[in-house]
Image: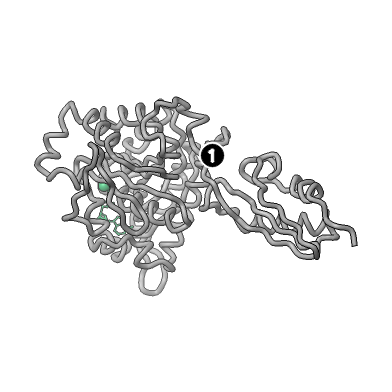
Amino acid sequence: MAKVQESSIYEALSTVMEPDLKKDLVTLAMVEDIEIDSENNVSFSVVLTTPACPMKEQIKNACIEAIRQHVPEAAGVRVNMKSKVTSSCGHHHCDHDRPLKNVKNIIAVASGKGGVGKSTFAANLAVSLAKTGAKVGLLDADLYGPSIPTMFGLQDAKPEVTDKKIIPLEKFGVKLMSIGFLVDNETAVIWRGPMASSAIKQFINDVEWNELDYLIFDMPPGTGDIQITLAQTLPISGAVIVTTPQDVALADVSKAVSMFRRVNIPILGLLENMSYYELPDGTRDYIFGHHGGEIFAKAQGMAFLGSVPIQRNIREGGDEGVPYVIGHPDSPASKAINNAAMEVARRVSITNAGLDAEQ
Ligand SMILES: Nc1ncnc2c1ncn2[C@@H]1O[C@H](COP(=O)(O)OP(=O)(O)O)[C@@H](O)[C@H]1O
Ligand SMILES: [Mg+2]
């Protein structure tokens, strides 16, 4: 029987499209480690742009199918799905002196106002991405109420400082830094003056993150000077807007959206939190109205990342220091959060490829 040639593997895989990046796997240089053994068993790796790729299975199956069709002499096919996260440096902010140059992507989590679940989502997004194998950090720069220490059960922890660098703490696979680790609430009040944005920038630059695929940035709520300065000076890959269905109607959310658009930061999508309450019989009570977030996202030309219900155990997870997706990994709400996280990662990859991730 004729030996399978490496060139025919490449030919077959050049018929498989990456559905988001709209090119084939060979053109995108996503195929590696091709091996063909003496029995004509074929194996190769496909290097995705994120371990949190929602299309992983689809791409894998398409590869197997392409080999079966185009290389009939192949006996068996084994596809190893790997990933190498792409960086926003290259399309936006290509400056080599940019701050945080070991951080491939900064994802800002923002909201029009406080209390909508921005930090809860930021914490769960970080943990969810880390669970897929990505290197993730979470930065809490909320001067008005740093909540990440509580949400990770690290109220009394103090980060180490070496060579003038602050070493992040680590829990549930995520590197963590919060203004709350460094200053008590009274000192944070002083930071809230006109110096706040430069103090936050200094703080961000002093943290030793090492290599990160994603840094989730829990931004201070609102759209004031601090937020605008941060959005302008940090190399942010994209922003996620968190809102409740009730607050969607408020001008604050639109202001947050326009702020990012003004400084050319793509909006990766809108997450609706506290969307409904599920009654014991399984019916949903849409306390704050139905589909408000989705309709708003569509009207603004943004992706809708999904709805997270209001649940006692989501609040308890935050208070007890165990992010909900860790405490209740298989629940429907965790699935909604994990799907939103994959969608965020996917849209970061699309943006990094120079394509439009909004829609
Ligand atoms: N989906 C939810 N279900 C129940 N409680 C929630 C939910 N999302 C957030 N919370 C709770 O609401 C409060 C505010 O959330 P938080 O994430 O701190 O908001 P923000 O960062 O926007 O100010 C916290 O007590 C949090 O535990
Ligand atoms: Mg918060």
* Residue 230, above or below 188: above
Q: Position of residue 270 (x, y in %)?
A: 43, 44
Local secondary structure at mark 1: loop
What coloring was used for the rendering?
one colour
Q: Position of residue 355 (x, y in %)?
A: 58, 34
Residue 33 vertical position relative to residue 78 in the rendered view, above or below:
above
* Kind of residue at disc 1: Gln
Residue 97 rendering spot, x and y as whole percentages: 40, 26
Using the rendered view, name the quadrant where residue 327 is placed.
Answer: bottom left
Q: Quadrant of residue 103?
A: top left
Q: Residue furthest left?
A: 186
Q: Residue at x 27, y 31 (%)?
A: 201
Taking the view exactly as shown, the residue that stands out farthest to the right is: 1
| Residue ID at (38%, 51%) | 126
> Against 96, is 109 above or below?
below
Question: Few, some or many C-alpha atoms within 10 Å of disc 1 (few <14, some 14-19, many ≥20)?
Answer: few
Residue located at (36% from left, 64% from top): 326
Of residues 271 and 229, which is closer to you in this image? Answer: 229
Figure quadrant of residue 353: top right
The count of marks equals 1
Q: Position of residue 19 (x, y in %)?
A: 65, 46
Q: Is residue 113 left or right of residue 85?
A: left
Specify whether 62 is left or right of 279.
right
Which quadrant of the figure contains the N terminus?
bottom right
Tell me the residue that label 1 is attached to.
359
Look at the numbered disc 1 and say if its residue's Cβ is closer than 8 Å to ligand 1: no
Q: Quadrant of the C terminus?
A: top right
| Nearer to the camera, 310 or 212 | 212
Q: Is residue 188 left or right of residue 327?
A: left
